Image (spheres, rainbow, N blue to C red):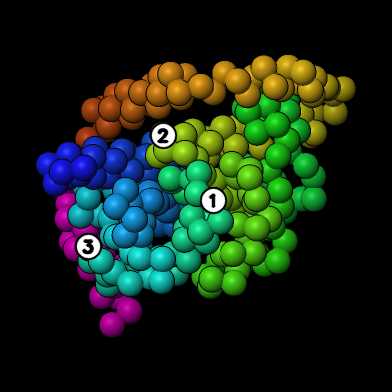
Amino acid sequence: MDDFKRNDLLSVELERLVLAHRVLQMEGHEDLTLGHMSWRDADGRGFWMKLQGLALGEIRTAEDLVLLDFDGNVLEGDGRWLHAEWPLHPGVYRARDDVMAVGHTHPFYSCAFSSTNEPLKCVAHEGAFFGGNVPHFNDTSDLINSRELADAMAQTMDDANGVFIRNHGVTFCGHSIQHATLMGIFLEKACRHQILMDSSGMAWTTVPPDEIVRKQQWLKPEILEASWRFYCRKLKTLEAAHPSPPVSADERIAPWLERFD
């Protein structure tokens, strides 16, 4: 690939990664300035992720991202503000060659569900997309901030597109930024469905196994892309109605850091 095509690909994917953070916030994944997504660098240098100190919805440009190698060395971007849980991302990438994007967030219903020992059931489409395959990682409820914990979490996740971290949150992944983002959204919806039905007192059923297989087949590339575009349009409409002036990462983070000087 020549430099022009490489730079064009990088620009497109980083713009998607920027949008993915704001889509996730819009869909209930916000938690102060916590949570982050990453994309595996196409040139094999490592992975791009958001800066610490910024909310998901505050990610506006590639300047809000940083490129790290799998050992945490900063290759591009401002390395002053790294999330303590950066090791979580290379943990998944090392274990899964098929994964191109990883997210870790603390959405309300997924966090509540992570405190249980219940398997995720297929209440509706969203649960069926996972086929009940979202394991629980119970080694810690604390930060996934070491290679040992990250590798253990990835081992628990195995070939699934998500994993619950006990009393903490979720990690989700996909073969593209769009796919990973949708997995995060669908996982939160699936948890909300199940918690609602479990607390309803009503008798209810799960999606039959043969229909689970058919529903999983819905997630073909054109459906994933159409769903991603829908959420981007929804975000554009929301942000048009409630515009926020662009502010540099340094301007946003610096006042927060000054309190700790």
Task: Residue at 48% x, 66% y: name it.
Answer: 87
Question: Would residue 235 be seen by someone viewing this image from the given angle?
Answer: yes
The stretch of residues the image draws in magenta is 245-261
Q: Is residue 171 above or below residue 194?
A: below
Q: Quick check: 170 left or right of 202?
A: left
Badge 1 marks a residue whose secondary structure is loop
Report, in whole angstroms, how far the alpha carbon at label 2 lies from the one at label 3.
Answer: 23 Å
Report, in whole angstroms, how far the alpha carbon at label 1 lies from the one at label 2.
Answer: 17 Å
Name the front one of labels 1 and 2: 1
Image x and y of residue 177, in percent? 40, 39
The quarter in which the N terminus is drawn is top left
Q: Which residue is mark 3?
A: 77
Badge 2 marks a residue whose secondary structure is helix
Mark 2 residue type: Gln
Decide which of 148, 98 is in the foreground and name it: 98
Question: Would residue 32 be seen by someone viewing this image from the given angle?
Answer: no
Count residues near mark 2 (Cα–Cα under 10 Å), then give few for <14, some for 14-19, many for 20+.
Answer: many
Instruction: Give the label on residue 178, or none.
Output: 2
Mark 3 residue type: Gly
Image x and y of residue 49, in percent? 35, 55
Task: Residue at 29% x, 52% y: name it.
Answer: 43
Q: Which residue is mark 1?
A: 96
Decide which of 194, 259 is in the foreground and name it: 194
Q: Is residue 73 above or below residue 159?
A: below
Extreme residue in the front direction: 1
Image x and y of residue 150, in percent? 56, 64
Q: Earlier in the sequence, mark 1 or mark 2?
A: 1
Q: Earlier in the sequence, mark 2 or mark 3?
A: 3
